[in-house]
Amino acid sequence: MKKSIKKIMIIGLSAITLVQGIDAKSFTDMKDSGYGWANEYVDYLTEHNYLAGYDDGTFKPQRAVSFLETLRIIESLKIGNVKDNMVYDLSPYKIPTWAVSAVNYNLQIGTITLNTLDAAVKKGLINGKKYPTRGTIAALFGRALESENTGDKTLLNYKDLDRVNKEALKYLPGLVSFGIFDKNGSDGYFNGDKHIRRAEMAVIMKKTLNHKGNSTTAKEETTEVVGTVLGYDTEVITLDVYGVEKNFKLGFEIKEDIVGSTIKLLISNDIAKSYTIINKKQATENIVTRCEVVGSVAAGNGYVITFKNLDNNRVPSEFSYYFDKNLSGTVTLKITMTSDSISKVELQ
């Protein structure tokens, strides 16, 4: 009994544990096996420690990939975005030790749920008695890569399209557009009810890595810098960032006066792409003007006096301000304007 358990563990691990120094040409069952089309993919994945062979020097390209191995592969490819960092209690599911981390990872990125595990147990997918279908594996990769609604179903040329399960069909157009699954399938068929063999999985894995690399390259590296604007021209903006003067190349034209304002600058590939004003510097101006008192109302220990501006300037034509004494007639006032608002009034 113990030997049997040990054998199962070795087989389960061999799909992903590392056997150094072996390439596809060295596997005894890859030579003239009918799986030559997979050699370059297996070469790359074994060289970079994503896949490995068995202790007897074989790769077993025809062997079906298990449910837990698929989860482990998704983890090893580092695809998916972690949505929660919860560590789940997997003891009720009797997950083998080598797969615990992978199951947790796929739960965290949303590839599977606890309900998925319940169903997998009932179907015999956890204990390896049965293998997931091509449609199931497509759905797992699709969820990990968030390919739902990212492709057009007209991309799919499968003759058996009407037999592809709905869950797989949600993700397949995206997986095809990512270059991971073939739009024509095998001889024109998707064969969604069949298993995926190790040779086929090698192709899927390498194409997933290609997509991941392209996405990373295409994705711009962006950072945000907060600082006070010291000056700018058509090419460079200078910020005071925590007391340090820094220059940034401008990728756009600034059409307003933001000198003195605190801004958040979005930097993409070392070029400023946009900005958001966090705290705009309020320009102040002192204006001496003649005003006529047109109203007065007692308020507390003073008066709210309404003035009519008699001069042509930025001061509003009529405004009110609180004084501790009553005024009448025509007076000369010193008005402090902050932006377009009156912030202070003094009697001259």
Image (cartoon, rainbow, N blue to C red):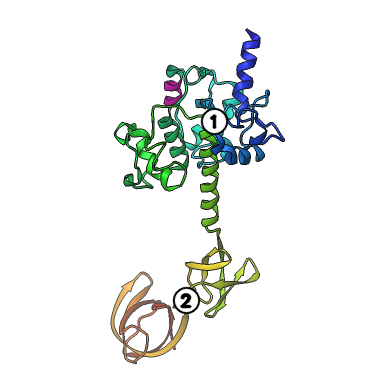
Seen as rendered, the residue at the extreme front is 32
Magenta region:
115-120
| Mark 1, residue position | 198
Residue position for label 2? 253
Residue 306 visible from this viewpoint: no
State the residue in front, 255 or 121: 121
- Using residue 211 as the reference point, say whether residue 10 is left or right of it: right
**Residue shown at 35% from the left, 84% from the top:** 327
Question: Residue 162 appears in which quarter of the rendering?
Answer: top left
170 in relation to 253, above or below: above
Q: Is residue 75 left or right of residue 19?
A: left
Note whether 317 is above or below 192 in the view shown: below
Residue 80 lies in the magenta-colored region? no
Residue nearest the viewer, comparing 11 with 286: 11
| Label 1 neighbour load within 10 Å: few <14, some 14-19, many 20+ | many
Tell me the SS state at disc 1.
helix
Name the kind of residue labelled 1 in the image: Arg
Work out which residue is located at the far top of the displayed protein and give it. Answer: 1
Q: Quadrant of the C terminus?
A: bottom left
Q: Look at the numbered discs 2 and 1 and tell me whether their residues touch, using CB distance below 8 Å.
A: no
Q: Position of residue 277 (x, y in %)?
A: 47, 68
Q: Residue at x 62, y 41 (%)?
A: 44
SS state under label 2: loop
Q: Left or right: where does residue 172 sit relative to residue 239?
A: left
